[in-house]
Image (tube, rainbow, N blue to C red):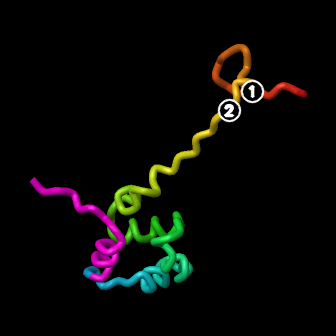
Amino acid sequence: MTKAPTWDRHSILAELRRRGMTLAGLAEMKELSKSGFRNIWTRPNSRVEQAISDFLGVEVEKLFPDRYPKRRSHILASDYLSPSSNGTPTRSAA
């Protein structure tokens, strides 16, 4: 039984280099900013993450598991819920 690889900064860079590519080379190939690739380890950038994912052939969620899935949870006050309780929020005029 083989274990799925855990992707971290070093393993991503190592795999890129094994395939004869660097972050700067990938930036030029995808026509994206080199600084975006340089800062990928500290700042999320979905276009850069997707470019790395496409090149390696690995899902972006597996390469950057701490950043995905992107959640946008909204908490609504009960004041805004409609009395019909159909789940759609409505606002009353104040």
Residue drawn at x 49%, y 77% as measured from the top left? 37
User: Does 59 appear above or below 16?
Assistant: above
- Residue nearer the viewer, 48 or 13: 13
Marks 1 and 2: in contact by CB < 8 Å?
yes
Is residue 13 rendered to the left or right of residue 78? left
Residue 12: give x, y in percent of width and height: 33, 72
Residue drawn at x 90%, y 28% as measured from the top left? 94
Calculate the distance from the C-alpha at mark 2 to the C-alpha at mark 1: 7 Å
Residue 77: give x, y in percent of width and height: 70, 29
- Chain part drawn in magenta: 1-17
The question of residue 15 being in magenta is answered with yes
Residue 88: give x, y in percent of width and height: 68, 25
Residue placed under numbered mark 1 in the picture? 80
**Most extreme residue toward the right, as rendered?**
94
Label 2: which secondary element: loop
Amino acid type at circle 1 is Tyr
